[in-house]
Image (cartoon, helix red, strand yellow):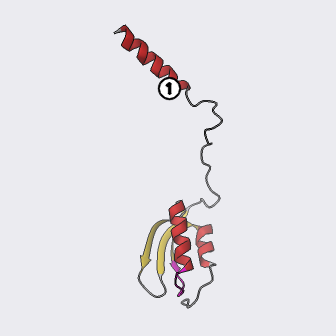
């Protein structure tokens, strides 16, 4: 009983102090400059193959910068997503071939 109690105290004290003041532990992530209020948008893709707009959306989705991505099978593609305004503006500035006007 005494041994169990002593081990519990030792384990608790070690777990409370481990990781403090360690230089090899990376700092907590800071919010990216692209963070902001999410807006819904419909982005029109390009008639190119592979579609550079869709490729960029997939990269941003992998990074977590865009959410709720839905790709409609149309020509050119239509992509509905949620993202901050800065990212929506970036996607709309990508040059397109055969864009709808």
Residue farthest to the top, as pictured: 2
**Number of numbered callouts drawn:** 1
Majority secondary structure in the magenta region: loop
Question: Is 62 placed above or below 2 here?
Answer: below
- Residue at image x 59%, y 85%? 96
Q: In which quarter of the image is the N terminus?
A: top left
Reply yes or no: does residue 7 show up in magenta.
no
Magenta stretch holds residue 50: yes
Residue beneath disc 1: 15
Picture coordinates of residue 24, whole percent (x, y): 63, 38
Residue 86 falls in image quadrant:
bottom right
Question: Along the line of sight, which residue is nearer the eye, 4 or 95?
Answer: 4
1 is higher (above) or lower (below) than 62:
above
Position of residue 79 measured from the top left corner of the image (x, y, whole percent)? 48, 77
Residues drawn in magenta: 43-51
Residue 60, image quadrant: bottom right
Q: Residue at x 54, y 86 (%)?
A: 48
Can you say which quadrant of the picture contains the C terminus? bottom right
Percent x, y of residue 49: 52, 84
**Front residue of this view, candidates 6 and 64:** 6
In the displayed structure, 26 sits above or below 49; it is above
21 w.r.t. 77: above or below: above
Residue that sits furthest to the front in the current view: 24
Q: Position of residue 41 (x, y in %)?
A: 51, 74
Q: Residue at x 66, y 35 (%)?
A: 23
* Label 1: few (<14), some (14–19) or many (≥20) C-alpha neighbours in 10 Å: few
């Amino acid at each position: 009983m005494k041994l169990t109690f002593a081990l519990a105290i030792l384990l608790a004290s070690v777990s409370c102090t481990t990781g403090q003041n360690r230089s090899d532990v990376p700092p907590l992530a800071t919010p990216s400059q692209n963070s902001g209020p999410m807006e819904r948008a419909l982005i029109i893709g390009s008639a190119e193959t592979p579609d550079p707009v869709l490729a960029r959306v997939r990269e941003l989705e992998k990074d977590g910068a865009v959410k709720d991505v839905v790709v409609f099978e149309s020509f050119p593609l239509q992509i509905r997503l949620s993202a901050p305004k800065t990212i929506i503006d970036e996607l709309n500035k990508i040059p397109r071939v055969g864009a709808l006007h």
